[in-house]
Image (spheres, rainbow, N blue to C red):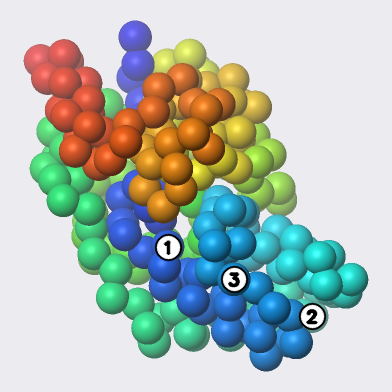
Amino acid sequence: MFKGVIFDSDGVLVDSMSYHAKAWVKVFEDEGIDVSEEEVYEIEGSNHKGVIDIFFGKAGKEADDSIYEELLQKKRKLFMEINEAEAFDNMRECLELLHGRYKLAVASGADRKIVSSLMEKFYPDIFDVVISGEDVSNGKPDPEPYLKAVDKLGLKRDECLVVENAPLGIKSAKNAGLYCVAVATYLEAEKMSEADRVFGDHSGLTDYLKELALAKE
């Protein structure tokens, strides 16, 4: 019996990934590295250090501690300037139904300021725990983000359900030994095959979450 639900943020709770992708593309362009938005979608869930390492590595470059912070600041500024993200339809209603029936957490690869601002705007007073990419040493697909969320919720792994939308996030949840459902937001459902259950869109996901909430009545 589930007692907690842990959500990824971008692409699950908030339709924000395109703004992250555009910001990263510009950051890497300024570094002389050619990156497409699709490539950023493919590694959704990685924290900023992981994103930088991946694309610097592909370009045959190495990043150091100073470049991580510099590029994070640039990316955050760009994201805030262009961000027009909205919450997905009916997600607020679902979370209000789940709230009080389950312990709720967010485990995101995005940086703390961005995650906090999005949650405060769209889902205030909903989540018991918020884990950002800066709160862990190892980002997704490492299990650390989800294991930390489980620990902070004070639950066991078999008491927690994860909601994801990205292959690296799904792998992180499964590496943590958690049951994971996924929604195909930006990538094809076929790329979510490691999840225990896949929904083709948010309509299917929200129906599932409502059923989950009502089962606790």
- The residue to which callout 2 is attached is 66
Image quadrant in which the C terminus is located:
top left
- The residue to which callout 3 is attached is 36
Tag in front: 2 or 3? 3
Give me the residue at 12% from left, 19% from top. Answer: 214
Seen from the viewer's position, the closer of residues 16 and 120 is: 16
- Residue 153 in percent (x, y) is at 43, 31
Distance CA(mark 2)–CA(mark 1): 25 Å
Distance CA(mark 3)–CA(mark 1): 13 Å
Residue type at the position of mark 1: Met
Can you see residue 101?
no
Residue type at the position of mark 2: Ser
Image quadrant in which the N terminus is located:
top left
Name the N-terminal-most of marks 2 and 1. Answer: 1
User: Which quadrant of the figure has residue 206?
Assistant: top left
Indicate the secondary structure of the residue bearing disc 3.
loop
Name the N-terminal-most of marks 3 and 1. Answer: 1
Residue lying at the far top in this picture: please name it.
1
- The residue to which callout 1 is attached is 17
Can you see residue 84?
yes
Q: Mark 1: give few (<14), some (14-19) or many (20+) Cα within 10 Å.
A: many
- Residue 184 in percent (x, y) is at 38, 41
Seen from the viewer's position, the closer of residues 214 and 153 is: 214
* For residue 95, side relative to residue 114 (left or right): left
Name the N-terminal-most of marks 2 and 3. Answer: 3
Q: Mark 3: give few (<14), some (14-19) or many (20+) Cα within 10 Å.
A: some
* For residue 31, side relative to residue 209 (left or right): right
Give me the residue at 69% from left, 78% from top. Answer: 34
Vertical relation: 74 (above or below) 49: below
Give me the residue at 39% from left, 87% from top. Answer: 81
- Residue 176 in percent (x, y) is at 61, 26
Vertical relation: 105 (above or below) 79: above
